[in-house]
Structures are given as C-alpha cells and as structure tokens.
Amino acid sequence: MFSELILALSTIEKEKAIEEVGRLLKEKVNPFQIIEKGIMLGMNIVGQKFEEGDYFLPELLLAADIVEACTDLIKPYITSDQYESKGIIVIGTISGDMHDLGKNLVIRTLESAGFKVIDLGVDVPTEKFISAAKEEKADIVAISTLLTTTMVHMKDVITGLRADSDLKDVKVLVGGSPLDDEYAAKMGADAYGENVVDALRKAQELIS
Ligand code: B12
C-alpha cells in the first residue's frame, strides 16, 4: 500500500510523493500509518543512500522539503477526537542538532490532540530549555535528537531541570532515532517516544 510513496521519497520525486499521500488520504488510510509506514521508511532509504555515498546533502534537503509538503497535506487529517488529555509541552531539538522534521511531526500530533506546544526550534541550548520550561509553566519538556554526537547533551538538560527546585514536577520526554528506552532511562528521562503515536501516548501517560 505504501510502496509507491516509499519509492517516490527515496528517489526524491516530490510531485509523485504528494500525489501518493493525496491518494492514501482519499482512501482513508490512517494518517499515522502514512507517516510511519510510508514517510519514515522512505526517509530511511534516503538515509541509507546518504551513508553509502549515493546521496549527498542536497538530496537530504530535497527529501526534507518533500516530507514538509507531505505533512502539510496530512495535518488536517490528524484529528483530536481519539484523544483527550491536555497539557503544556516545551519542545526542541538539542544543541548542535539541526534536524527538525521528526520533531515537527511530533508537534503537529501533540497539538492535534489538544496539547499546547511551545516549539523552541533546533540547536537549543540547555539554559533555553530550562528558562522556557519555567516561563511557560510546562508539564513536559520534550527533547529531540537524531545525531549520536549530540544525544549526550540531553543528559545536561535533564540534570539542569532536575537541579531546579521550581521544575521538580516537570516530566522529560525524549525522542529521536539513535535513542531507545534503555538509553532514555539511563539519562534520567521519564519516557522515550519511538514515533509520533508513541510520543502522544507517552505524553498522555506523563500528564495523567
Ligand atoms: C533529512 C535529514 C537531514 C536534513 C535535516 C532537515 C531537517 N529540517 O530536519 C539535513 C540535510 C539538514 C541533515 C543534516 C545532517 N545530517 Co541528517 N539526516 C536526515 C535523514 C535522511 C532523515 C531524518 C528525518 O527527517 N527522518 C524522518 C523523520 C519523520 O523521522 P525522525 O526524525 O526519526 O523522527 C521520528 C522519531 O525519531 C520520533 N521523534 C523525533 N523527535 C522526537 C522528539 C520526541 C520528544 C519524541 C517523543 C519523538 C521524536 O518521532 C518522529 C516521527 O515518527 C536521516 C536518516 C534517517 N533515516 O533518519 C539523516 C541522519 C540523521 N543525518 C545524519 C548526519 C550525519 C547528518 C549531518 C552531520 C551530515 C553532514 N555531514 O553534514 C548533518 C547534521 C547537521 C546538524 N548539525 O544537525 C546521520 C546521523 C548519524 C548519527 N547516527 O549520528 C543520519 C542518520 C544519516 C546517516 N545514515 O548517516 N540531515
């Protein structure tokens, strides 16, 4: 069902990818499945090609542009009727990391479920996470990273949050492809979200 979308993304064919997403939505395919089983798998192939030296940064950027266009199409179909919980979430990509496509998808999903989400953007320093958590009275601080070189900085944010007496009730949710449950727990995070659906489920569990 998703092979055409995966192929279009992995071969960087924007029009075809958009057409496929439109077709899947029209056929009432679950939008989360389009993200996880289509877009994610297509981007994984792009990543592999990059690793193998077949693609370079321009191709990654073009692929990123396609993902943005596809998610713009999907957003209206992610509705809040299946979810109830609400809370305030401050989110950002950790310092040194510019990847934001996954984070943006997570934001859209959380917002559609009724959360207020404050996006700090990419390359966010520890102090910014802490000051924003205070200013916004956040229930959850969510941190994203896609690089093994920057995931170590997540621990600094968590340590900083834990050391601040004003923020002792704030929960920390982490995500990004190099992480897993074990690494998240070792850093002291409250939860790890593997994908958009898991991110939403974990956010709701942390709030309840
Ligand atoms: C697109 C892309 C880029 C784009 C990013 C554009 C953008 N606006 O984000 C650009 C071209 C800028 C880029 C740059 C680089 N990239 Co890059 N990039 C990718 C690529 C191909 C896809 C990432 C992506 O967007 N996937 C799609 C999204 C939807 O998935 P996702 O990000 O994983 O997010 C999901 C989950 O992880 C989770 N999630 C994500 N965040 C969060 C947060 C929370 C709180 C939760 C709960 C969940 C969650 O939910 C999301 C949805 O399911 C990956 C390969 C790959 N397959 O991941 C490489 C990859 C991540 N990049 C890589 C590298 C090396 C780089 C560069 C260093 C390249 C270079 N030599 O300059 C630079 C780094 C720049 C920097 N300082 O950040 C490596 C990282 C290797 C590593 N293990 O550290 C990868 C794995 C490619 C590879 N195989 O070598 N990249």
Image (tube, grey):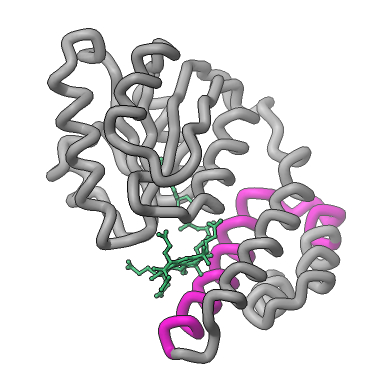
Quadrant in which ligand 1 is drawn: bottom left
Tell me: residue 164, above or below residue 43. above
What residue sits 16% from the left and 23% below the top? 162
Residue 135 horizontal/vertical position (percent) = 41, 12
Placement of the N terminus among the 4 image quadrants = bottom right
Placement of the C terminus among the 4 image quadrants = top left
Q: Nearer the viewer, residue 28 or 202?
A: 202
Tell me: residue 83, above or below residue 175. above
Compared across the picture, whether 168 is left or right of 60 comes to left
For the image, the number of numbered tags is 0
What span is in magenta?
A: 23-52
What residue sits 71% from the left and 71% below the top? 5
Compared across the picture, whether 5 is left or right of 198 comes to right
Compared across the picture, whether 23 is left or right of 10 comes to right
Q: Magenta stretch: residue 37 in it?
A: yes
Question: Is residue 208 visible in the rendered structure shown here?
Answer: no
Where, by quadrant of the figure, is residue 155 drawn?
A: top left
Residue 111 horizontal/vertical position (percent) = 60, 28
Magenta stretch: dominant SS?
helix
Residue 87 horizontal/vertical position (percent) = 48, 16
Question: Is residue 70 visible in the rendered structure shown here?
Answer: yes
Residue 27 horizontal/vertical position (percent) = 83, 57
Q: Magenta stretch: residue 165 in it?
A: no
Compared across the picture, whether 73 is left or right of 134 comes to right
What residue sits 39% from the left and 21% below the top? 132
Tell me: residue 19, above or below residue 189. below
Tell me: residue 5, above or below residue 143. below
